[in-house]
Structures are given as C-alpha cells and as structure tokens.
Amino acid sequence: QLQLVESGGGLVQPGGSLRLSCAASGFTWNFYAMSWFRQAPGKEREGVSCISSGGSTYYADFVKGRFTISRDNAKKTVYLQMNSLKPEDTAVYYCAAVQRPYGCTIAPTTADYWGQGTQVTVSS
C-alpha cells in the first residue's frame, strides 16, 4: 500500500527552525523525485522545494537560503530543514512523489502521490 507520511510540524517562534520528514512506502523509491508543497489558509498550494532521485535540488525563491531539502534513500525518507522561519511560512506542508527519470519539479499538477500534510505555525 502506497503511503507518504509527514511528521515534524508544530508551533515555532519567528526565527526558529523545524525539520519535516516524509517517510515513503509502497512504490519504487528510486524512480521518483520528491517535492514539498505548502498551502496557507485561503491560498493556493505552492511548491517549496524538490529533490531528484539523483540528489539535485531546486528551491522556490521565497525559501532559498533558509530551507534545505535532502533524501535518505536507505530510509526512503525526504526531509525539509526549515531555518529562519517567518510568520508567512505558516501553512500545511505536504510532501509528494513525482515519477521522473531525472530532475525534479515543484509544479503541484505533476505530483503522482501526496502525503496527508503537517501543520507548521510560525508565531510569537
């Protein structure tokens, strides 16, 4: 059974850090790029970052220099390290799997599988 299970969300003060995890099962991990998206209340889902099966990465401009994506192929897990968090980072964060032979994408329409989401709230 295919599953993407996110964890690591929570409440953090501005300037703080969180690390999100997304554990995958039920599909051929090495065939998929992995992406992180987020959706704030009243806004459309937007791409945050992605990592290819080979480890190349891409970041949306609004997180460059603050967020780092990585993947552990042995654990079939993708991570999103989020530093210097801002109130505008508050959203539900989703991981997604995109079947691609190379590269990665943060276009929501390309995702094949989605996790259930984890809430990140940045507030003092």
Image (cartoon, helix red, strand yellow):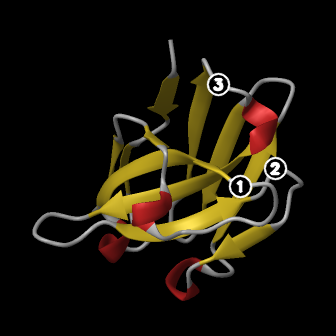
Please say if 115 is above or below 96.
above
Q: Which quadrant: the C terminus?
A: bottom left
Question: Viewed as shown, does residue 94 lie left or right of 81?
Answer: left
Q: Nearer the viewer, residue 25 or 109?
A: 109
Task: Say whether disc 3 or disc 2 marks the residue closer to the N-terminus.
Answer: 3
Q: Nearer the viewer, residue 103 or 24?
A: 103
Q: How many marks?
A: 3
Mark 3 and mark 1: Cα distance apart in space: 13 Å
Please say if 101 is above or below 117.
below
Mark 1 and mark 2: Cα distance apart in space: 8 Å
Residue 50, horizontal then vertical, whole percent: 65, 62
Cβ–Cβ under 8 Å for marks 1 and 2: yes
Q: Residue at x 60, y 17 (%)?
A: 26
On the image, numbered disc 3 is attached to which residue? 27
Element type at marker 2?
Answer: loop
Element type at marker 3?
Answer: loop
Residue 29, horizontal then vertical, whole percent: 74, 32
Mark linked to residue 30: none
Task: Say whether disc 1 or disc 2 marks the residue closer to the N-terminus.
Answer: 2
On the image, numbered disc 1 is attached to which residue? 100
* Amino acid under disc 1: Arg
* Amino acid under disc 2: Ser
Mark linked to residue 53: 2
Q: Is residue 52 visible?
A: yes
Q: Residue at x 58, y 55 (%)?
A: 35
Question: Viewed as shown, does residue 33 lie left or right of 43?
Answer: right
Residue 11, horizontal then vertical, whole percent: 33, 47
